Image: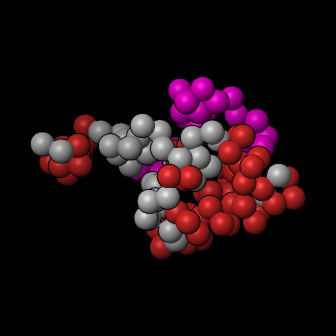
Amino acid sequence: MSDILKFVTHADTLANDPQGNLLGLDAWSEDLAVEIAAGMGLTMTDAHWAVVRFLRDCYRDYGDEVSAREVSRMLAEKFATTGGSRRLYQLFPGGPVSQGSCIAGLPMPANPVDRSFGFRH
């Protein structure tokens, strides 16, 4: 049985999707974000929090209607004055969209086909 089918048939048994993202957005907290980041070898700084909060705001404003490429573009624009994409990848070596979304407790945006978005596995 595929991982997603396990979720569908036993929804109460999983807290995460097969990619490690939280299934329930309400389950997220800053303490949980710190734990998720630590599991990825990251220590949350003010710069990390700024990205995480931006991603959560973006998801609240656009939901899952925005693609991973668009989220990446919005991140680069928002943080252009603090180093842009280069700085974002220093903060999130696994990809600011992929790793950032996971820490932010968000599902991965649609169409993450570009390897530059980062992968955890």
Q: Does residue 93 sit above or below 109 in this rendering?
A: above
Q: Does residue 38 sit above or below 78 in this rendering?
A: above
**Taking 34 as reference, is 17 left or right?**
left
Q: Residue 110 location in percent, x, y? A: 44, 64
**Taking 87 as reference, is 110 left or right?**
left
Q: Residue 56 location in percent, x, y? A: 60, 57
Q: Residue furthest left?
A: 1
Q: How many marks?
A: 0
Residue depicted at x 43% and y 64%:
111
Where's the N terminus, which quadrant? top left
Residue depicted at x 69% and y 60%:
75
Where's the C terminus, which quadrant? top left
Q: Residue 37 location in percent, x, y? A: 59, 33
Residue depicted at x 55% and y 53%:
117
Decide whether the magenta segment is chiefly helix, strand or loop. helix
Answer whether residue 29 is magenta in the image.
Answer: yes
Residue depicted at x 46% and y 59%:
112
Q: Can I make out residue 25 in this image?
A: yes
Answer whether residue 89 is magenta in the image.
Answer: no
Q: Does residue 40 sit above or below 28 in this rendering?
A: above
Q: Does residue 42 sit above or below 81 in this rendering?
A: above
Q: What colour scheme governs how the chains and residues are painted in the rendered image of this protein?
A: secondary structure
Q: Quadrant of residue 35?
A: top right
Q: Can I make out residue 60 in this image?
A: no
Q: Residue furthest front?
A: 115
Q: Nearer the viewer, residue 116 or 59?
A: 116
Q: Which residues are magenta?
A: 24-49
Q: Nearer the viewer, residue 29 or 119?
A: 119
